[in-house]
Image (tube, rainbow, N blue to C red):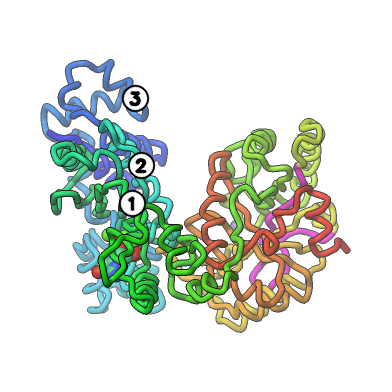
């Protein structure tokens, strides 16, 4: 049995456990093992007789070694067989739909023998579901909309997932001697929220034909390949177990810039660029920028050479959407886009006081290690009961803990007391004003009653903004990338009012949220609204998700001056926020 098959069976067992509403840690251990097996460079089957070697793989513990051995000898697992008596693996897909929890999935199976999306859609349309408990017309309408969204989205992948896969594959390709550069191109390089497939450009051994073909064989034999789609002279296309397609192209160093430019896209940007070339008697393809009359190469090795030869400033990949970037590049008016190094503070993060994993001190140390000079600890308020949200009493006690860590850090990093306070259904805030008055950073967010009509939701958030303690509006539209549209809200009106009141709007860097989106961000800038970019980290590692936030800000053409938390110190930052009452 090959690695992909082992990984698939382990992952399927995790899915069955999920439908069975099993312990999340147990589910996670199967998923992690599946990932670990998938990323091995050798076939696991060859290690089966030596449990020590299996144990040495991170993500595989003693129990999992037994499971893998069972898979290799019997082709299945006792646990998987047991779960398959009750459920079907396709049911996992049903869990991704709105309102479908494990219990509901089990119920539609036992009462309607429905175990996949097509079946569920048919049952919903035939009116079978409304006969079941707790499933009214409203539920069915929402479900059918959810199925439609799911079908639309299921062929795209979130940027952070694609990035992880691209990193893993790049590491495996790099094992071939002589590879010198591997760069993602396409939508991943442009920093889109989602990608359709991964485009990897590889340079290195591209001079001698037999080395190139050996490199191609190396790529085509990667153990994490599920289906090999195509293998050409310098291109390999394949899919991963999750159906994500990867196109790998091997290039000579000399045409690297032209290839990178071509395969980064977007298509519309490239079309406009080629037209510009033609007007100048030049032609642009994936190998070079050439003079038409005599085929002399004008530029090929670097992207900057190509743009400059067309009398353009270099266009950062995030701007290549044919939305004014070529005009600006010609007029030398492209913005100096923000970078990660410009960010000095992070004003939205959680600790183990609520649903975060780490302590205040751990978050502070991790932020310091990442070069930040100030952070705010903003745990949840009590309305979010499932996160163990803070009531007034605990919130006040939490401030003491935050100030203690602030003192312990001895000025190396400032740790500001804050809260992410829930905006309740009527626009009131979840904690007393007297409690909020003790906080430097009050982030107000909507976490409930997402289905209010647009007028009600807009009024609700406007009312929250009027509370003079609110300094930042958290994830203002509530959307979740690929899984949930934002709630109905007049976001332009909200941004306008926030600008008038001096309330900053947040760009939430968590790639699952990425909220505000690029259009909203451009509107915020137009209205002169203050903007902060925060990670909303629930663990120390999630502080690194700032990178995705920065990408989105760049896609919105924003500069360091547009973002408040580029201010070098906590004092300078706080001075720019709405003044405390
Ligand atoms: P995706 O994968 O749907 O998220 O979007 P992209 O932009 O990565 O598109 P993809 O993977 O089809 O192609 C990568 C880049 O390669 C694309 O942005 C521009 C270039 N490209 C690919 N095929 C064509 C083509 O037929 N014409 C032109 N002009 N460019 C192409
Ligand atoms: Ca692509
Ligand atoms: Ca592609
Ligand atoms: Zn939140």
For discs 1 and 2, the disc positioned in front in the rendered view: 1
On residue 61, the disc is 3
Name the foreground residue: 92 vs 129: 92
Magenta-span inclusion, residue 373: no
Magenta-span inclusion, residue 424: yes
User: Could you tell me how far apart the alpha carbons at marks 3 and 2 are, in whole angstroms?
Assistant: 35 Å
Looking at the image, residue 546 sits to the left or right of residue 436; the answer is left
Name the foreground residue: 323 vs 188: 323
Residue contact between numbered discs 1 and 2, judged by CB atoms under 8 Å: yes
Counting residues from the start of the chain, the first of labels 3 and 2 encountered is: 3
The residue to which callout 1 is attached is 256
Residue contact between numbered discs 3 and 2, judged by CB atoms under 8 Å: no
> Residue 181 in the image: x percent, y percent?
35, 42
Residue extending farthest to the front is: 294
Within-10-Å neighbours for mark 2: few <14, some 14–19, many 20+: few
Q: Which of the image's four quarters has the N terminus?
A: top left
Looking at the image, residue 27 sits to the left or right of residue 416; the answer is left
The residue to which callout 2 is attached is 181
Looking at the image, residue 146 sits to the left or right of residue 365; the answer is left
Residue 531's image quarter? bottom right
Residue extending farthest to the bottom is: 455
Instruction: Judge whether 490 appears above or below 357 on screen.
Output: below
> Residue 177 in the image: x percent, y percent?
27, 31
User: Could you tell me how far apart the alpha carbons at marks 3 and 1 are, in whole angstroms?
Assistant: 43 Å
For discs 3 and 2, the disc positioned in front in the rendered view: 2
Query: What is the magenta range?
Result: 415-433
């Amino acid at each position: 049995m090959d690695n992909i098959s082992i990984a698939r069976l382990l992952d399927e067992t995790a899915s069955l456990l999920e439908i069975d509403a099993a312990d999340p840690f147990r589910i996670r251990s199967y998923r992690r093992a599946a990932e670990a097996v998938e990323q091995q460079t050798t076939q696991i089957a060859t290690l089966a007789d030596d449990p020590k070697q299996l144990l040495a793989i991170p993500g595989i513990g003693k129990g999992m070694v037994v499971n893998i051995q069972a898979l290799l000898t019997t082709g299945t697992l006792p646990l998987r067989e047991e779960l398959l008596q009750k459920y079907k693996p396709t049911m996992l897909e049903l869990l991704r739909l709105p309102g479908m929890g494990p219990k509901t999935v089990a119920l539609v199976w036992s009462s309607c023998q429905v175990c996949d999306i097509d079946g569920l859609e048919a049952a919903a349309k035939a009116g079978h579901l409304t006969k079941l408990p707790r499933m009214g017309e409203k539920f069915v309408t929402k479900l059918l909309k959810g199925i439609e969204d799911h079908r639309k989205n299921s062929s795209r992948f979130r940027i952070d997932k694609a990035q992880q896969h691209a990193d893993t594959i790049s590491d495996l390709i790099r094992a071939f001697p002589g590879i010198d550069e591997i760069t993602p191109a396409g939508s991943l390089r442009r920093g889109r929220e989602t990608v359709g497939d991964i485009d990897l450009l590889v340079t290195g051994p591209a001079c001698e034909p037999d080395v190139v073909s050996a490199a191609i064989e190396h790529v085509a034999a990667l153990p994490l390949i599920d289906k090999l789609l195509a293998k050409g002279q310098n291109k390999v296309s394949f899919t991963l177990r999750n159906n994500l397609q990867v196109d790998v192209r091997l290039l000579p160093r000399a045409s690297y810039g032209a290839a990178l430019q071509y395969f980064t896209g977007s298509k519309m940007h490239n079309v406009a660029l080629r037209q510009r070339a033609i007007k100048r008697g030049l032609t642009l393809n994936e190998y070079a920028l050439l003079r038409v009359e005599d085929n002399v190469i004008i530029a090929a090795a670097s992207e900057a050479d190509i743009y400059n030869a067309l009398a353009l400033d270099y266009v950062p990949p995030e701007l290549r959407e044919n939305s004014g970037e070529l005009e600006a590049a010609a007029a030398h008016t492209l913005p100096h886009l923000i970078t990660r190094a410009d960010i000095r503070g992070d004003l939205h993060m959680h600790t183990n006081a609520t649903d975060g994993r780490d302590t205040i001190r751990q978050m502070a140390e991790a932020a310091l290690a990442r070069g930040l000079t100030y952070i705010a600890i903003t745990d949840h308020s009590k309305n979010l009961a499932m996160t163990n949200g803070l009531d007034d009493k605990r919130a006040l006690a939490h401030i003491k803990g935050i100030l203690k860590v602030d003192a312990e850090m001895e000025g190396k990093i400032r740790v500001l007391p804050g809260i992410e306070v829930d905006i309740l259904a009527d626009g009131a805030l979840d904690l007393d004003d007297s409690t909020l008055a003790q906080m430097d950073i009050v982030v107000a967010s909507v976490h409930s009653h997402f289905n209010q009509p647009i007028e009600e939701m807009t009024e609700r958030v406007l009312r929250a903004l009027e509370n003079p303690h609110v300094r930042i509006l958290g994830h203002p539209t509530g959307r979740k990338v690929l899984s949930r549209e934002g709630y109905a809200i007049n976001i332009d009106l909200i941004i306008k009012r926030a600008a008038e009141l001096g309330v900053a709007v947040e760009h939430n860097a968590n790639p699952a949220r990425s909220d505000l989106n690029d259009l909203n961000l451009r509107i915020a800038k137009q209205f002169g609204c203050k903007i902060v970019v925060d990670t909303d980290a629930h663990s120390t590692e999630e502080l690194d998700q700032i990178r995705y936030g920065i990408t989105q800000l760049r896609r919105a053409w924003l500069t360091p001056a547009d973002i408040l938390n580029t201010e070098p110190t906590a004092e300078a930052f706080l001075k720019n926020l709405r003044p405390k009452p």
